[in-house]
Amino acid sequence: MRFAEKQSQQVIEELAAKLPVPGGGGAAAFVGAVGTALGNMVGSFTKGKKKFAAVEEDIIELQKKCDATQKRLLDLMDEDALMFEPLSKAYAMKETTEEERLEKERVLEQTTLDACKVPLEIMEECCLAVDYLEEFLKKGNPLLVSDVGVGVLCCKAAILGAALNVYVNTRLMKNRDVAEEMNAKTTARTEAYAEKADMIYASVLKQVKPS
């Protein structure tokens, strides 16, 4: 059964269990989807109200984007789990001969590279979600400003969590040029969007925290 089709309690129980998947990558995708959904909720309480008629089309478009990101993040939970199996099998390959050793090294390199791709995409989707939440903060119903704050914290956590799952794999890669390219991209995105998320959260906090 796909993670998107499971009850949230089941997903949480599977995360807590002695199971190889879901793990940190799947959790990051799940938390990112939750953060995106909170932005989407702001849109749901904004559209259709005369008070926000001027931004109605923008809100509807933002919700379409959030729908796509939510769906993709839930799909990435499954893809993260699927990437674990070939990597696990690669570590179990025999290496009693030189030929077997070289083949194991080749397969490990490829499966490790593949394992980096899912958290990279999780990170990218959550960066998009931060952008959407920023727009919801500007144009959405201000009564739901705290939900924007919670949403952006979820997405920040997902971005940083996905980054860890990139780094834990790139450190094992033999091709250091490719590894460092991935690391540089990951670091640049996490630094930029962690800062952006913090700014959004600070703006929300300023609006809701008693003086």
Image (spheres, rainbow, N blue to C red):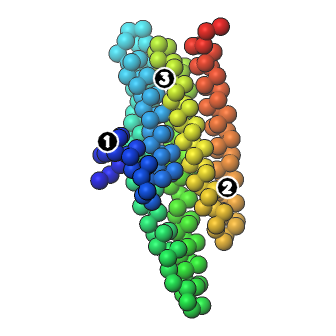
Left or right position of 195 against 58: right
Q: Earlier in the sequence, mark 3 or mark 1?
A: 1
Rendered residue at 55%/80% (across/down) = 104
Query: Which class describes the residues within 10 Å of circle 1: few (<14), some (14-19), or many (20+)?
Result: few
Q: Nearer the viewer, residue 114 or 3?
A: 3
- Which residue is labeled 1 in the image? 7
> Looking at the picture, how far across and down is residue 142, in whole percent?
49, 14
Query: Residue 3 versus residue 129: which sits nearer the camera?
Result: 3
Nearer mark to the viewer, of 2 and 1: 1
Numbered tag placed on residue 147 in the rendering? 3
Quadrant holding the C terminus: top right
Is 153 situated left or right of 57 in this image?
right
Residue 59, picture quadrant = top left
Amino acid type indicated by mark 3:
Asp
Camera-side residue of 100 and 53 = 100
Q: Residue at x 60, y 25 (%)?
A: 201
Q: Secondary structure at mark 1?
A: loop
- How far apart in space, not on screen, are marks 2 and 1 (Cα)? 34 Å
